[in-house]
Amino acid sequence: MAFPILRARNSTTPYIFAFQEPFSGVGVAAQKAAAPAITAAIRPNHGLSLIKLSTVSIKVFILICTFLYFQLNKFIMALKDDTKKIQEAVGATPDGIYGKNTALKIIGKLDFSKEDLTKIIQKKAGGLPDGAYGPNTAKGILESLGLGEEEKVTVTSSAVEGSYPEATKATPNISSYKIRPEGVVLHHSSGSYEGSISWICQTKSQVSYHCIIDTDGKRNSFASDDSRCWHAGKSSFNGKTNCNGFLLGLSFSGNTNTRELTDDEVASAVEWLVPRFEKWGWPKDLSTVTTHREISPGRKDDVDSRAEAKIKDALRAALDK
């Protein structure tokens, strides 16, 4: 079959709008279907100054497209075959489609423990990688997804006859020489209470406080007051650097930037701090009560200003009695 040739107005030069004859690999129907579009593209009223099309250039173009199509299809089929092999190896349905079930099966075969997976999630969510899943990890995940709202904490007080229980789990993360504390730095751990204790009691964490307080007021002591704990890092206070050498570290669990301290946390902190004003001769104007945010500006953001205000207000009231 031959196709007609369109000639330019007042010209004997032919502009081929389709193939003069069919060629192997392209059906006649496909050639006919392409003809109207090409004709419209080169009509005189569209301007016949367009590039002259030749049978050879069109053949080359279609052959390239055909080659690319088959290569892409070959790649897709190979990928699907590889996915099936993986699915068979991990015990998933070998349908060649990578989805949630396949991913879970792969994770299962990697022999990750629940703690390992939790640590991975915590790192991605910007939390403390302690492997303990709790409200703070959940909060971090929601915040990473842009779904976080201010955390609402409801707890039952652990106080017994007005006093809060204090356990002792010693941390290995202290220096060999002793200090004489001149004040205290307020921190938050960013992790759960139990998770933070576990993390601080591990050498690899390289972090320690003198004490941490849970939302219900119970406390854990990590080291004696004269121990040099590792809570401040690069820091300065009242003209002196390396605050670990002269300030205690008192931490609250979780993140005080996303929640307010509970009444039990505040009362427990006051209970822990007030005797130290007398013991170490700290000034009652609270001039030596500071925060990690203040001694390491731009590097740390704990504790939140609301938490600082609550602790200082309660301390003033207690020290004025």
Image (cartoon, rainbow, N blue to C red):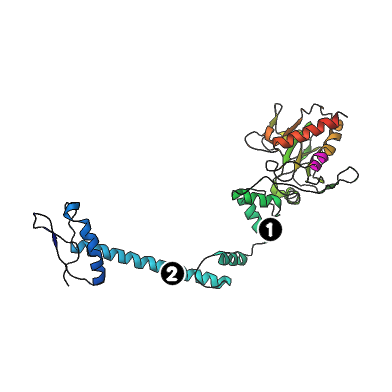
The residue identified by callout 1 is 115
Q: What amino acid does circle 1 point to? A: Glu
Membership of 265 in magenta stretch = yes
Q: Is residue 89 left or right of residue 188?
A: left
Please, which residue is most extreme toward the front here?
A: 45
Q: Which structural element holds mark 2?
A: helix
The residue nearer to you, when weighing 245 against 320, is 320
**What segment is highlighted magenta in the picture?**
263-268
Up the image or down, 265 lies above or below 38; here it is above
Label 1 environment density (alpha carbons within 10 Å; few <14, some 14–19, many ≥20): some
Within the image, what quadrant is residue 101 found in? bottom right
The residue nearer to you, when weighing 189 against 14, is 14
Q: Residue at x 23, y 68 (%)?
A: 32
Mark toward the start of the polypeptide (2 vs 1): 2
Image mark for residue 78: 2
Label 2 environment density (alpha carbons within 10 Å; few <14, some 14–19, many ≥20): few
Q: Residue at x 72, y 36 (%)?
A: 306
- Can you give x and y, in whole percent of width and height, for residue 9 in the image? 11, 55
Up the image or down, 64 lies above or below 311; here it is below
- Can you give x and y, in whole percent of width and height, for residue 137 in the image? 67, 51
The residue nearer to you, when weighing 207 against 298, is 298
Membership of 99 in magenta stretch = no
Up the image or down, 305 lies above or below 63; here it is above
Q: Is residue 302 left or right of residue 69?
A: right
Q: Which structural element holds mark 1?
A: helix
Q: Is residue 44 left or right of residue 140?
A: left
Please, which residue is most extreme toward the right here?
A: 161
Q: Residue at x 50, y 68 (%)?
A: 97
